[in-house]
Image (spheres, grey):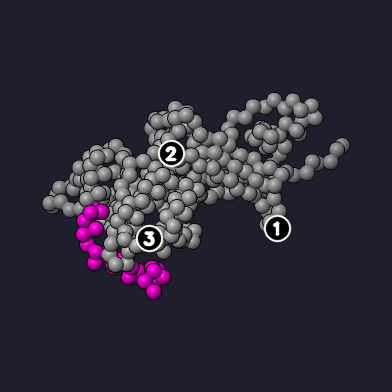
Amino acid sequence: MSEITPSQTVGPYFAYGLTPKGRCQWDPNGQYAWKETVGDNLVTPDATGEKIRIDGRVTDGDGQPINDAMIEIWQADGQGRYAAAAGGARPNTQFKGFGRSATNKDGEYGFATVKPGVVPGPKGTTQAPHILVAVYSRGMLRQVYTRIYFADEAGIRSDYHSGTTWAPVGRTPVVRGTGARYSVNMLSAVSAQGALRFMVHDGTVNAKVFVDFCKRLLTDAKGPVYLIVDGHPSHRAKAVAEFVASTDGRLRLFFLPGYSPELNPDEWVWKNVKHDRIGKIGVTTKDDLKTKATNALRRLQKLPALVRSFFHDPNLSYITA
């Protein structure tokens, strides 16, 4: 009678059945024919949003690469729509938002996908753009989960609401709005002297849009412009670096540390516009949303004392010191 086989958390079919891509060399005949059902390229012709690449590495507790782990991701598209929405509706015919990648001999994995949009949250709230990640590996009885978030950018949605309202006694308060979802992005720059410059944009904020915004800042400024920015891909793009170099010192970019929105003075601008203004009024169309966002920014532009007060935040003392 043979001995009991060793216990395995993950059996040999884990790699062959779920991540066959690149595994054919394991077949002595080189004819491993199992077809990949879910791969690492999520981009389809109908996928909306900025195309991005996600690359990572899985290591063990000693920092050694794990060469047979599996990573799965799940996400919405650039408009915040999941492939299988509530009620069974499928707004995307091809983009599924689900991908799977195996690690190679160096523990590396990668995905080609699109940057997701803002998605609905519980109780009528919204959630920041993110990608859900599941990690499977030998020795793990259960997979582990995490999320990938993106460097901050100011997006305003028609279904974002904040605060409360009132109604006469015995009547349910009703705020008229639209069930449709619209969004616009805004770029802004503020100074400790109370100046505010902004631009409202319909589409994704990419390097071209950011360079256009910087050109407007230089046109309005008499002297050099020192701009504090976060790590958004549009800020670190090659085209942006080339434009900055072409200004002969008139424009300089200073990058904030990762995951430090509290150090960004524009967060106060976005709070004032999104939470204090747009979130408390109804929106009927995309043009209406854009108009109200622009009006809110113009209002703030006429209140330099309020803009100066943003810099009273202790986290921003590095600017005024």
Residue 225 tag number: 3
Segment tinted magenta in the rendering? 296-321
Residue 160 position, x and y percent, is: 30, 47
Residue tagged 2: 49
Q: Nearer the viewer, mark 3 or mark 1?
A: 3
Task: Find out whether residue 320 is within the magenta segment.
Answer: yes
Q: Earlier in the sequence, mark 3 or mark 2?
A: 2
Q: Residue at x 32, y 64 (%)?
A: 191
Q: Residue at x 79, y 26 (%)?
A: 29
Q: Marks 2 and 1: CB-CB under 8 Å? A: no
Q: Nearer the viewer, mark 3 or mark 2?
A: 3
Q: Nearer the viewer, mark 2 or mark 1?
A: 2
Q: At label 3, which amino acid type do we have?
A: Val
Crowdedness of circle 3 by 10 Å Cα count: few (<14), some, many (20+)? some
Q: Quadrant of residue 315?
A: bottom left
Q: Is residue 56 left or right of residue 236?
A: right
The secondary structure type at the circle numbered 2 is loop
In the depicted structure, whether residue 310 falls above or below residue 186: below
Residue tagged 1: 62
Q: Residue at x 42, y 35 (%)?
A: 48
